[in-house]
Image (spheres, rainbow, N blue to C red):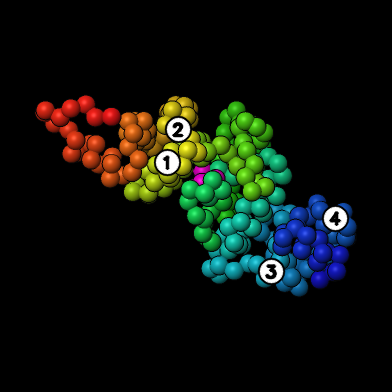
């Protein structure tokens, strides 16, 4: 690989965009590195060092990257027009560990021209701005606010796994049932929305685990029971 291009890739933590490369080397230098198997195109105009592409053969190149690198690649492709969202945002908030092979979820304004591609799912949201307070920066990456990430992720997770990130976020004082309720109000067609609302009610009542919720609903009920707080 050209020494200048190699240095640029190393400075980018294994990632380089076409726009950045063109500022220091001719386009044919990047094309040559791809032909020689030194760089791999993971998204339009986004390339990573070939030795960083692992995962399952046959899967989209983006899905074969370490999640942290995959997130950076998706945001580089978005070029400031998108933010990590849904389950990808949960990983950035420390509520669900990402894994190699996970799809990267990006939310964009409706005016953005980005479209879903292999390895990345694009969600177009009316009224979204890629600026505070709509998005925040965590670990150097742009991500949707926690409350919207939890609401957006609800239908994407298996039913048995849905409550855990919500409960943990409240337990760790990252958010409150009230703030989550406001975010839920903005998603009137959310799948299994009633279950989410019930969970928020239990958390507001003081329950802090699935066991406490089960006890609240099935044990500490019935005639003669006092009002518990």
Percent across and percent down for residue 83 are 62, 42
Name the N-terminal-most of marks 1 and 4. 4
Side (left or right) of 38 relative to 108: right
What residue is rendered at 31% in x and 44% in y?
210
What range is drawn magenta here?
86-90
Say if 38 sits above or below 72 in the image: below
CA distance separating discs 3 and 4: 19 Å
Query: In the depicted view, which residue is nearer to us: 64 or 199?
Result: 199
What residue is rendered at 55% in x and 67% in y?
55
Circle number at residue 50? 3
- Secondary structure state at the residue bearing disc 3: helix
CA distance separating discs 2 and 1: 9 Å
Name the N-terminal-most of marks 3 and 2. 3
CA distance separating discs 1 and 4: 48 Å
Q: Which residue is mark 2?
A: 176
- Secondary structure state at the residue bearing disc 2: loop
Name the N-terminal-most of marks 3 and 1. 3
Circle number at residue 22? 4
Q: Badge 4: few (under 14), some or many (20 or more) residues near its Cα, within 10 Å?
A: some
Q: Badge 1: few (under 14), some or many (20 or more) residues near its Cα, within 10 Å?
A: some
Q: Which residue is mark 1?
A: 171
Disc 3, disc 2: CB below 8 Å? no
What residue is rendered at 43% in x and 28% in y?
178
């Amino acid at each position: 690989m050209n020494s200048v291009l190699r240095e640029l890739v190393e400075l980018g933590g294994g990632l380089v965009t076409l726009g950045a490369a063109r500022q220091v080397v001719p386009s044919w230098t990047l094309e040559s590195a791809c032909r020689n198997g030194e760089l791999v195109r993971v998204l339009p105009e986004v390339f990573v060092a070939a030795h960083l592409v692992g995962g399952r053969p046959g899967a989209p190149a983006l899905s074969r990257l370490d999640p942290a690198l995959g997130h950076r690649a998706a945001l580089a492709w978005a070029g400031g027009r998108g933010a990590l969202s849904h389950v990808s945002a949960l990983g950035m908030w420390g509520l669900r560990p990402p894994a190699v092979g996970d799809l990267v979820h990006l939310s964009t304004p409706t005016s953005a021209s980005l479209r879903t591609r292999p390895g990345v799912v694009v969600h177009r949201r009316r009224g979204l701005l890629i600026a505070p307070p709509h998005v925040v920066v965590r670990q150097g990456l742009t991500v949707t606010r926690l409350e919207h990430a939890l609401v957006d992720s609800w239908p994407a997770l298996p039913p048995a796994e849905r409550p855990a990130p919500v409960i943990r976020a409240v337990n760790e004082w990252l958010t409150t049932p009230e703030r989550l309720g406001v975010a839920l109000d903005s998603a009137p067609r959310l799948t299994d929305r009633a279950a989410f609302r019930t969970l928020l009610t239990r958390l507001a009542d003081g329950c802090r685990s699935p066991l406490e919720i089960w006890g609240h609903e099935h044990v500490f009920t019935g005639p003669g029971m006092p009002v518990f707080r």
